[in-house]
Image (cartoon, rainbow, N blue to C red):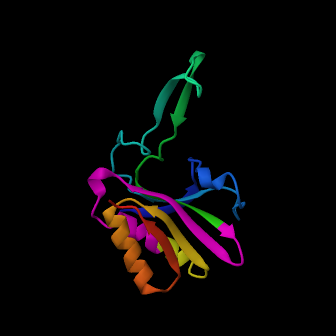
Amino acid sequence: MSRIEQVVSPLTYLQSVPGRPTVMGKDRRLQLVDLTAGPTSEFYFGEHHKTERYGRSGKLLVKPRTIITPGADEGVIAFLDYQLYEDYGLHVRIDYMLTREERRAEGCAKALVDYLYTMHRDARVIDWGDIHHDAALRLWQSYREAGNVPTTGRNRCW
């Protein structure tokens, strides 16, 4: 049995730092949780460590830096990170959406997007940003054609 939870995203997105402030102050995450799902080492679902030995100028660092990419909570099979903006009405921007490899084509992403559109049906626009996956592109096209909430995005599938 799966359930959808809303939490604060552990990731920071570049477009959320400069420019307009977000309404809620932090990036938000919708996550689909199935407690029967086992652990995985997929990126963004498990914590990853990377050591940088060279600085921006290319010089060897005296003390190497360790960059930690936080993983999702236990049992998360799909997540959708988004931001809320107040700009002459509510704008929603989807930053990132990912489903675990073994759970693809089961409707996990559609369930999260349905939940997002239901929560923010009064939004002025929902912006999908750059779309890099064919399945996400088909999902975006179906919501754009439905026309309940104005939907924008850019096709980057090639």
> Which quarter of the figure is the C terminus placed in?
bottom left
Q: Nearer the viewer, residue 56 or 100?
A: 56
**In the image, 107: left or right of 151?**
left
Residue 138 position, x and y percent, is 34, 72
Q: Which residues are magenta?
A: 85-114
At a point 50% along the width and 74% down the height, the residue shown is: 152
Q: Nearer the viewer, residue 99 or 142?
A: 142
| Left or right relative to 31: residue 124 | right
* Residue positioned 39% across, 59% down in the render: 132
x, y percent for residue 104: 29, 59
Indicate whether 21 appears above or below 54.
Answer: below
Q: Is residue 117 above or below residue 83?
A: below
Q: Position of residue 25 (x, y in %)?
A: 70, 57
Residue 156's spot in the image, x, y percent?
40, 61
Residue positioned most to the top: 62
Q: Which residue is drawn at the image coordinates 40% and 69% (left, top)?
A: 111
Q: Quadrant of the N terminus?
A: bottom left
Which residue corresponds to the image point at 64% horizontal and 55% vertical from the top-left?
16
Q: Is residue 113 magenta?
A: yes
